[in-house]
Image: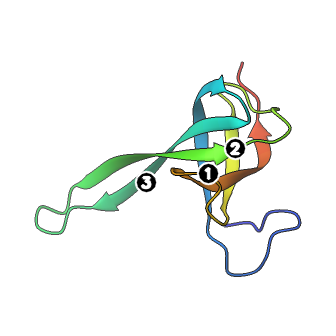
Amino acid sequence: MAEAIGARPGRKTRVGVVVSDKMQKTVVVEVQTTGRHPLYKKIVRRNRRFMAHDAAGEARAGDKVLIAETRPLSKEKRWRVARVLERAR
């Protein structure tokens, strides 16, 4: 994955879609991963939701964003929005 601008090395990054921007300085990002089922070998899609810190408040619902791992910011926030990759139509 491409490194985020100003990111520290070794930090995980994920690409996902913002599904909620109703909180202040927080967005919910849904990350979809695909993998092969261990027994049946069929490709399986898995969705995982992360709460990400968005200090500038620039991400909107439907935007594709890059999130980067960071220190715990609250009970459930351990990610921050590195940058908006694609705006929602």
Q: Residue at x 76, y 29 (%)?
A: 87
Quadrant of the snapshot with the N terminus: bottom right
**Quick one: SS at disc 2?**
strand
**Quick one: SS at disc 3?**
strand
Q: Report how far apart the C-alphas of labels 1 and 3 lie in the structure.
A: 10 Å
* Residue found at the far front of this picture: 75
Q: Residue at x 72, y 26 (%)?
A: 60
Instruction: Name above or below for residue 11 compared with residue 23.
Output: below
Q: Assess whether mark 1 and mark 2 are in contact (beta carbons under 8 angstroms).
A: yes
Looking at marks 3 and 2 on the same chain, the residue that comes earlier in the sequence is marked by: 3
Say what amino acid the circle numbered 1 marks: Val
Say what amino acid the circle numbered 3 marks: Thr
* Residue found at the far left of this picture: 39
* Tag count: 3
Label placed on residue 47? none
Picture coordinates of residue 23, whole percent (x, y): 64, 27
Q: Assess whether mark 3 and mark 1 are in contact (beta carbons under 8 angstroms).
A: no
Q: Residue at x 42, y 47 (%)?
A: 48
Label placed on residue 33? 3
Q: Is residue 38 left or right of residue 84?
A: left
Determine which residue is flagged by label 2: 65
Image quadrant where residue 22 sits: top right
Quadrant of the snapshot with the C terminus: top right
Instruction: Name above or below for residue 71 compared with residue 43.
Output: below
